[in-house]
Amino acid sequence: MKKNNPLITGTIILTVTGFVSRFIGFFYRIFLSRVFGAEGMGLYQLTSPVLALTFSVTVSGIQTAISKFVASETSTHDYRSSFRTLFTGFGISMLLSAGCTAYIYLFSDTIAAELLFEPRTAPLLRIIALSIPMTTIHSCINGYFYGIRKTSVPSLAQLAEQIIRVGSVYLIYVYYTGKGYTPTISFAVVGLIIGEAASMLVCLAAIYHRFYSLTMSRCLIQKMKQPAFTYIKEARRLLSLAVPLSLNRTLINFLQSIEAIYIPQCLQRYGYHNARALSVYGVLTGMALPLILFPSAITNSVSVLLLPIVSEADGSGNHAAVRKAVRKSIKYCLLLGFLCTGFFLLFGRFAGNVLYNSSLAGSFIITLSFICPFMYVASTLNSILNGLGRTASTFLFSMVSLGLRLLFVFWLIPVLGIQGYLYGLLASQLMQTLLCVFAVRKYLR
């Protein structure tokens, strides 16, 4: 394969950055778990459903639509059209993010008490709400750069976000403990905002250089002065793809939120008290799962770049390229997955004890190791199916997988404890992978 292949080049950039970022984040979670404990990690993780829902509502579909519609710039050099696409998508997303920010900030107490069943998350939600507009800005810009296959900008933004977030939390922690204050998990949430601000600034600088500091900038700006109906037409085009994607992801994230919120509740039905339930939830989602997901930096990088490449190949009728992408994705994801499974089986318990000082984390890691091959294959095949325009299929597969997992949450956790949820993760991931493979079966012949 050629060295200048955009999939290879982009994957290398995203993978290296992803590994560096996850490496930093890995030790950051160790720091958080030791400073704030398993219960603090549980509180922190309970806010994740709110962030996921707001992301799916405000920008997830728009980001994908921008990426898809600006992909042709690499061959046509139509900067005016791609900038109009980015500008229109940005406007739509910012309106939605402003509404979500105001709602979460004003009704944080209600959300915390009645939706998350944990009033202590209310101040965390108010802080998190301020990060939503910044997330929207850099996500739209990243969508543009993914579309034109310049992955260096999203990679740099990701790295800046991680470094600044971790560094700021550590400095805040040192400052306040030096003053005699007891550290709280709010420090981590403040760091999240600072990190998002850093990522946003990197993306704004990159897009400024792309469109305004080039020699063609004046001509481009003049040509952008077009009637309002041009932007309305562009908005309709973007929304035609973004709305179904956003609805699908919102519904999926809503079900995932139910899952995340009710795991501690069902653990209490099993017999745990509130603090113990939050601690077990924090160990699973804040310690064990991040380690299992660490190698997925590779498959995530491939997935991001496969969508525009497969979309372009399918649009031009190049079915051989699609077939090659499907076969190689399955082959190498299975290889990576089995290697990771073997590694976690051998060293999972050791990793849990050494890194987190938690034998429970080690037990979770060993059990979860079996999902690696299925998780990696499903992630890349989902991206390929989206590139082929099979968004309804990926949505259906995710719904079936989530539905199966929720059955385990509500029926088996009260009987078997957290082990019932681990079985559900394994069963649902296997189900989703089999469905994805069945959907691309014609490319395997």
Image (cartoon, rainbow, N blue to C red):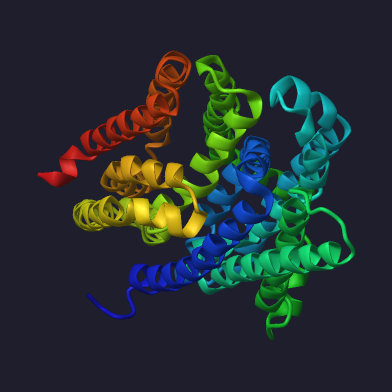
Residue 352: percent from left, percent from top: 43, 52
Residue farthest to the bottom? 215
Residue 167: percent from left, percent from top: 70, 70
Which residue: 61% across, 69% down? 79
Closer-to-camera residue (214/191): 191
Total labels drawn:
0
Which residue: 33% across, 71% down? 8
The answer to whether residue 48 is above or below residue 351 is above
Residue 422: percent from left, percent from top: 38, 32
Residue 308 in sight in this render: no
Closer-to-camera residue (198/353): 353
Say whether residue 428 is left or right of residue 207.
left
Closer-to-camera residue (65/10): 10
Say whether residue 68 is left or right of residue 193.
left
Say whether residue 159 is left or right of residue 136.
left
In terms of image quadrants, where is residue 420? top left
Which residue: 74% across, 48% down? 185
Quadrant in the picture for the C terminus: top left
The answer to whether residue 396 is above or below residue 2 is above
Quadrant in the picture for the N terminus: bottom left
Which residue: 81% across, 49% down? 130
